[in-house]
Structures are given as structure tokens and as C-alpha cells.
Amino acid sequence: MLNKVYFLPIFLNLIFILNSNATSGGTGSLFENLPAVAMDYKVHIDAGKEDCFYQYVAPGATFYVSMQVIRGGDGMAGFAVKHPSGQIVHPYQWQANSDYTDGQSTGGYYSVCIDNQFSRFAGKLVNLYITVVKYDDWEKFTKEIEDLNLNMQNFTQVIQTVEANMNVMFQYQANSRAREARDYALIRDNNSYVGTWSLVQIFVILITTTVQVYFVRKLFDVKSSGYSRNRI
């Protein structure tokens, strides 16, 4: 079975801090030079299909990816992550949600695959959240400040701590939004189910009432014959 392949649109929901290295010209992509990139979007996986996505991670950066099924079928899907070396670092697991973190990446393109092959009839709507953070870039800021004879080590450490905490916060927010979208989809499905069956039951009651009234009236519908009138 052929797999669909997508290169992630890394321009979605960028979270970054520009520095002189990011704004200077270079042969690589501007987004690959940013200290941090975050993506949060939804993808639809057709029934019986497997879709794979590729994301570049710079050497030494921290790579994080999470998946959560919002709606469709049994609410679960397969999720796997393949290292740029070709090794499957997160084997396939049929779950409603899953995540993976690589704290010190060797660099390259990670493959993130979502499998819906076990579901033959129902497609799945999946929320995918990916972040790539290069904490080592903060050391470059420290060296630039030291060149100006300023002792900003404590300040830089505070910034690094804030950046790390913000990244964790963004991950929790993404998971919360995914759960909210899943609950909203479930509420809409339940409302549609209740509304549909309520209309069906009303229609059945109307038909049943009409039939009962018809047959009750037929019981009291007595027609006199011509023979009886002649005898009187």
C-alpha cells in the first residue's frame, strides 16, 4: 500500500526569537536557523490509509511530537516516529493519544507516521503538535554579551529557564486544545444522534396513532343492508 508523504508546513504558528544569525543570509532555510519552531494543526487520515510527515531537526535540538485522535471510528490510531538514521524510535501503538521526545537530536529529517489501516470504513481527524527547540543558541547570546564586557550569565540562565518552561506550557496547551476539540466533536455527534432518533420516534408514534384511530373507527362503522329495510 502506498503511503502519502507530506513535508510539514513549518510556517504555521511559529514561536521564535530572532537573533543576528537567524536574520543573516545563508544557504539553509530561514526556519531551520530559528531557535524554536512550533506547529499545531489537524490532519485527516482516510480509512485504511497511513500518512507520514517529515520534519527537519537541527543537531543538538530538542524534538517533541504529540498525536491525539479528535474524532472518527473507535477514536484511536497508530503512531510511530522514525529517527533520521532509519531506526524506529517510537514503535506503532494503537492509542487515542501518544507523544515522543528526543532531548539531544543528532540532526536530520524525522518521520512521523499516523496509521489508520485497522479502520476499514472510518476516517480519523488527528491533532498533531510538533516543536523543535535549540537551547544551545542561548550560549551564542551569552558570548555576544561577553564581547561587550557585560556579565549577563544569571540573566541568560533566567531566559533559558523561561524558554524551557514556555515550551512545556505550549505542549500542555496543545494537549488541552486537542482534548477540547475531541470533546466538542463527541458532543456534536451525540446531539445529532439524539435528534435523529427523536424525529424517528415521533414519526413512528404519529403513524401508530393514525393506524389505531383508523381501525377503532372501522369497528363502529356499521352499514345497514337493503334486506333488513324491506322486511320492516
Image (tube, rainbow, N blue to C red):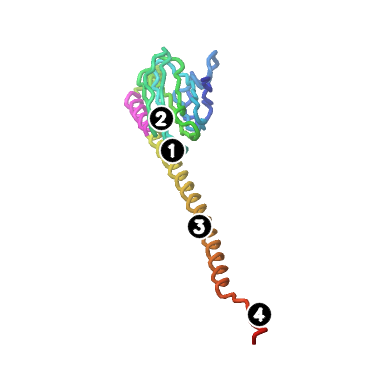
Residue corresponding to mark 1:
178
Please state which amino acid type lies under the numbered disc 2: Ser
Q: CA distance from mark 4 to mark 1?
A: 82 Å
Q: Quadrant of residue 69?
A: top left
The residue under label 3 is 201
Q: CA distance from mark 2 to mark 3?
A: 43 Å
Kindly identify which numbered label has been placed on residue 227. Answer: 4
Q: Nearer the viewer, residue 145 or 87?
A: 87
Identify the element where label 2 is drawn. strand
Q: Measuring 38% from the left and 22% from the top, which residue is drawn there?
A: 62
* Residue range (magenta): 152-168
Query: Tag 3's secondary structure?
Result: helix
| Left/right of residue 231 with respect to residue 19 in the rendered view | right
Residue marked by disc 2: 66
Label located before the other in sequence (4 or 3)? 3
Q: Residue at x 46, y 41 (%)?
A: 181
Q: Is residue 131 above or below residue 125?
A: above
